[in-house]
Amino acid sequence: MVLGVVQLSYDDYLVYDEIIEMKFVKSVTHAIEGLGYVLREHANFRIHIALAFVAIVLGISLKLSNLELSILVITITLVLMAEILNTAVEELSDLITLRWSKHAKVAKDVSAGMVFLTSICAAIVGWLLFIPKLN
């Protein structure tokens, strides 16, 4: 053995691989639970999902190019991510404040503003993608 280096047996690697796999499965499970929570508990997220579905179906039916569809999907993803982050900020604010707090209000307002701004930008992207195809 070289100073500071430990040699692992094949069995050690198998155990290590199982641990890594278990951590990955656990991470994916938590992610799915988080998405499920947002879907169940937040109507705005469900509205964004419905609008995303309509936009993608419209994009396909209008024969948007692969690049245009990619831009659409990225834009939709940004809106959904903003909504999820807004939910996380709201939940954390509610967790750490027992009473009304100006700081919690500002955090919630700023995160809601993020969703609003992202949604406006998404509407502009949708307009730029769809209007020329509809004319």
Image: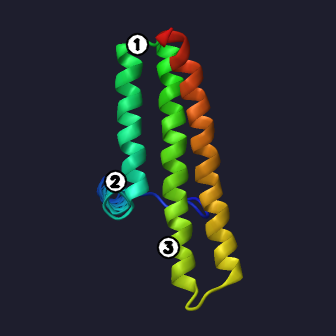
Q: Residue furthest front?
A: 135
Q: Which mark is residue 2?
A: none
Q: Nearer the viewer, residue 2 or 50?
A: 50
Q: Residue at x 34, y 24 (%)?
A: 57
Marks 2 and 3 in Cβ contact (< 8 Å) = no
Q: Amino acid at mark 3?
A: Glu
Q: Which mark is residue 91?
A: 3
Give the percent coordinates (x, y) of residue 6: 50, 61
Q: Nearer the viewer, mark 2 or mark 3?
A: 3
Tell me where residue 44 sits by quadrant.
Answer: bottom left
Task: Describe the colour scheme in one phrase.
Answer: rainbow
**68 above or below 46?**
above
Q: Amino acid at mark 1?
A: Leu
Q: Nearer the viewer, mark 2 or mark 1?
A: 1
Instruction: Using the rendered image of the protein, determine whether residue 16 is visible from the camera's viewpoint.
Output: yes
Specify whether 20 is left or right of 81: left
Q: Nearer the viewer, mark 1 or mark 3?
A: 1
Give the percent coordinates (x, y) of residue 98: 55, 91
Give the percent coordinates (x, y) of residue 115: 58, 52
**36 above or below 71?**
below
Tell me where residue 29 sits by quadrant.
Answer: bottom left
Q: Which mark is residue 17?
A: 2
Marks 1 and 3 in Cβ contact (< 8 Å) = no
Which circle's residue, 1 or 3, is located before the other in the chain? 1
Specify whether 82 is left or right of 40: right
Q: Secondary structure at mark 1?
A: loop
The crowd level at tag 3 (other Cα within 10 Å; few <14, some 14-19, many 20+) is few
Q: Secondary structure at mark 2?
A: helix
Which circle's residue, 2 or 3, is located before the other in the chain? 2
Q: Which mark is residue 62?
A: 1
